[in-house]
Image (cartoon, rainbow, N blue to C red):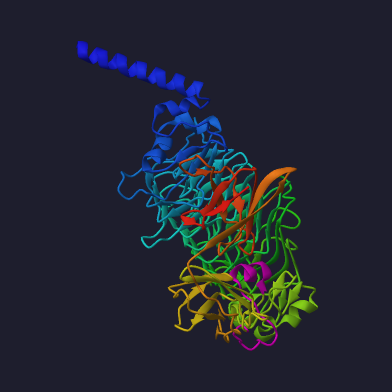
Amino acid sequence: MTLRLIRSASAICAGVTLILGALLAGVSPAAANGCITPAAGTSLDPFLIQDVGNLECLRDNASDYWHRGYYFKQTADIVLSATTDWTHGIGDDSDTFNGTYDGDGFTIDALTVNGSTKVGLFANANGATLTAITLVDPTITSSGSYVGALAGYVDDTTSISDVHVINGGAGATVFSSGNWYGGLIGSASGGSVIANSSSAASVAGGLSGVAGGLIGIAENVSITDSFATGDASAFGAAGALVGSAVAPVNITRSFSTGNATDSVSGAGGLIGVAATDDTYTITIDQSFATGDSISYNGPAGGLVGLTEQSGPTGGQRLVVTDSYSTGSATGRWAAGGIVGQADAIAGQSLALTRTYSVGTVDATDVTADDSAGGLLGVEGLGGAAVITDSFWNPTDAGPAATAVFGTESTQGAMRSRSLFASAGWSISDRAPAATTWTSCVAYNSGNPILQWYATAQGWSCAPTPPPIYPPSAPLDVVGVAGDGAAAVSWSMPASSGSFAVSNYQVMAAPGGKGCVTSTLTCAVTGLANGTAYTFTVRALNGAGWGPWSAASATVTPGAPTVIISAVRTQVRGRPGVIVSGSSTLEMGAILRPWVRFPGQVSFSEGSAQVLADESGDFTWQRRTGKKVYVYMTAGELTSNRIVIRP
């Protein structure tokens, strides 16, 4: 009993000492728990997440870390495959996470969370900043609602940027038996911003819920430069990017490639169900979807399954500009290449401007008043949809496309720039170009693509594909001799050919020694001192190697040398000596003088640092009228010794 009391007292004293020490050192008291290295928790002095233990420490210490506005920075890849499955993430309803987590480009591998509600790496983030995080092969499972690989629930202007859920081989999955689940986030709201982020997770649920390839439900959210590639399926509504969007929501320069499947409410390539009200709109701009959308008992659309209005007057609408779909849309009573069904309380509920679809559409319930259209399947109220400069064609849409909304064209015309240019589209037949769209026969079957996406993919096109050429020869090859080596440099070729130059090869003659590099300098080693060499260089691009350059001037490697001489003269108005030297050292090499006067037994190193110039030459001076012995050193290299007499 006495021993236990002593140990308990010692532990308490140690804890108090640690906390006091942390306070005196200017760090957060939270560091006193000892499972994360002490820090101030600021951007200049963040808590470092260095391993599994640190990450799980953040997960398990709510009062110390979650709702304190702290800054956390990951410093290494973290693999969780050997750890026990998580039952909850970081943050909850009583202590939301409101700090900054900077993944700094490192990965979190094999995260497995089995929870109830608000499930993900972060369960509940409120006013937080989550950036540069990569989740590899996460497995997220929930029996409740708000489920995502990164976060179950984010609100209050949370900022999410450069966050990615990727498939590393084992697969990334999100499954919920409840509602609102997405590949990245279950629910996002309150002015939150998602930028430059993506998910490859497969998203599915039980007999309820709303699923999104990126976000389950989004309300008052901005999504920019983001994408999802996994399939999304749900009972309620499914969108390959966002399951349900509640205005205001803005989607810009984003896309999906996965399939969306739902049973009841609606399925869409970007949004399953889009809901506007009296005040706020939903916008989709410069975005696209390529996957298929299927709703077994509801409408399906290439971009949006169903758009609907709420509120007393339903004054606002879904606005889609400069966007397209290529996947098929199959709904029970409504299917559209862009929107399956547009419901309205009053006035306009949908505006399509400069859009097109080339996907097959089909409304399968032939016994009901079903309808399929190349752009829109069903208009719930006459005049609810305003469609401008938007196109479809019967060949791609298929025989079920009987609802004629927008402009009917032909497959051939839609694969040419002229149709869209005549309608006022900002479109070029070149990429890159300063236009919104480009029409390239090599991509997307010749149908228009967005310039930003072509740029991101590194695509380029021109009306007549140019011939493919390798680079011309590099210029101005120069060799600088070293000890058994030579530093070779050159200028870029006058022409890089048809592609960017990726590598250069240097060859020495005689002997054939060489090197390969992606820069404009290279060190050739293994040369024989005393042998004269010349060097030639050639460049490589996607078309192959170009010709060899003209040979450099002759270069003879040799061991480095330092030779000095001296004269007596006036130094700053008094008798002195000036020591001059030449060497084979590189420019900027540091030499030090060593001096001995008569009567001294040994040399003393001077304090001066003497720099070699571009020719390897240097000078050093000292005021003295005495006889003096001098030599210079550069590292282990020593010059000749000289005697300077009065």
**Farthest residue, direction front:** 646
Magenta highlight on residue 101? no
Count of picture labels:
0
Q: Is residue 477 left or right of residue 35?
A: right
Q: Nearer the viewer, residue 530 or 250?
A: 530
Residue drawn at x 61%, y 85% is 550
> Could you say where residue 205 lies in the image, as x and y percent from the top left?
42, 54
Q: Nearer the viewer, residue 399 or 285?
A: 285
Q: Is residue 136 left or right of residue 606?
A: left
SS assignment for the magenta stretch, majority: loop
Magenta highlight on residue 459? yes
**Farthest residue, direction left:** 1
Residue 405 appearing in the image: no
In the image, residue 639 above or below residue 574: below
Magenta segment, which residues? 449-472
Tell me the quarter of the picture where residue 428 sits. bottom right
> Could you say where residue 577 lies in the image, as x and y percent from the top left?
65, 49
> Could you say where residue 71 lies in the image, as x and y percent from the top left?
54, 37
Residue drawn at x 42%, y 34% is 36
> Could you say where residue 643 lies in the image, as x and y percent from the top left?
56, 52
Q: Nearer the viewer, residue 30 or 261?
A: 30
In the image, residue 90 above or below residue 196: above
Quadrant placement of the N terminus? top left
Residue drawn at x 52%, y 63% is 561
In the image, residue 153 above or below residue 324: above
Residue 133 appearing in the image: yes
